[in-house]
Structures are given as C-alpha cells and as structure tokens.
Image: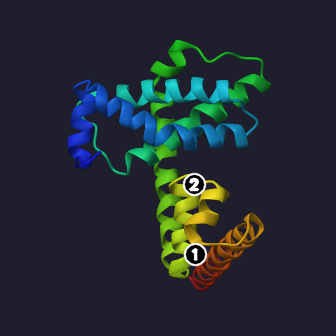
Amino acid sequence: MNNSPEQFITNLKNGNRISYEALYKENYTPVERFIINNSGTRDDAKDIFQDTLLVLFTKLKGDNFELTASLKTYIIAISKNLWFKKLRNISYHKEISLTDYQSNKFYCDIDSSIEKEKSYWEKLQTYLSKITAHCNHLLNSMFFKNKNIEEIQKEFGYSSKHTAQNQKHKCIEQVRKIKNLEEQQENKIVQVG
C-alpha cells in the first residue's frame, strides 16, 4: 500500500478491509515459512497467523499502542511467540486457552518478543548494508521479496539454477563473515570493559 505506516495503522484500527487484505498478503508467507521450518504444517501456519492477527488487533485497539518497529516485525514476533508457546504446550499435552490470550503475562511476553525481533532485524539490516550491492540485492529479492530460485536466475541472468544457488551461498557467506567479525568485536569490547 502507498499509505504511511501511521495511516495504515489508522486504517486497520478503523476496520478497513483493503488494509487487512494488504496486511495478510504482505505478511502471511514469512510466517508460513517460519512455521513450516520449525516442525509445523501449512494448517498450523494458517491457525497461528489468524491468532497473530487477533493479538495484533487487540494491541492496535489499545489506547496506548505505539508502533516502535515495522508491522512485519510485530507480526513475525507475535507469530514466533505463539508458535513456540504452542510447541511447548504440545510437549506438555496442554491446550492454549482463551484466558492465556487475555493474560497480562501473555502480552508482556509478546512485547518482549517484539523487542527481540526488532533487534534481530536491525542487526540483519546492518549486516546487509556491509555486503556487496549485488549480494544485497540478491538476498533482498530472495528473502524479503520471496522470489524463488527460478525468478532469481532470470532476474540476475544466471545460466542455471545451480549458478544461482552458488551465488546465493556466496552472498550468505558474506553476511556470516560480517556477523562473525562484528560479534568478535563486541566480545573484545565486553572483555576490555
């Protein structure tokens, strides 16, 4: 959507159907990918995403709601929190009850998850800003625009899927090296302090 984040939030608060559809379209796929990559199914992802939207809309309706991160960060954080809670409950043969969703602790856990997710995305953006422009573009296309390997091959003019996969691997290695370097520098600072 072409709205500012504030206007988009206002539209959601007012029940604007087009904004809800845009929210779903822009955010469902990353949640589904996360759930499936963490022992879930597509049905689990649909359930968690619906629960995520309920939590988000409850937060939006609160008088003191303030957007401190991107909406995508909120949605991912809430989804992760709900999914991990569900996995923990499954291991204890417990169901998540309606009162769980209404408890103050539940919303404190959500807020904590949002802060962790925000920190993660901020660090990731820092790492991406330090790699080559080509790799930055490729990784953004793959992971943020959800393009598959065939689309990447075509967009970047690679001769085969294998070449595209190799380039993806090299770009991810650039991010890993920068991440490791920054973590080493942070550890040195901690040790000196």
- Type of amino acid at the residue the image marks with label 1: Cys
- Please tell me which residue is depicted at 46% across the width and 54% down the height of the picture: 118
Q: Which mark is residue 182?
A: none
Q: Which residue is mark 2?
A: 147
Q: Name the secondary structure under disc 2.
A: loop
Of 50 and 168, which appears nearest the observer? Answer: 168
Q: CA distance from mark 2 to mark 1?
A: 14 Å
- Which quadrant would the C terminus be assigned to in this image? bottom right
- Please tell me which residue is depicted at 51% across the width and 14% down the height of the picture: 99
Left or right: 61 with respect to 22?
Answer: left
Give coordinates of residue 26: x percent, y percent: 44, 42
Q: Which residue is mark 1?
A: 135
Other residues around mark 1 within 10 Å, as few (<14) / some (14–19) / many (≥20): many
Of 131 and 168, which appears nearest the observer? Answer: 168
Give coordinates of residue 192: x percent, y percent: 60, 86
- Type of amino acid at the residue the image marks with label 2: Lys
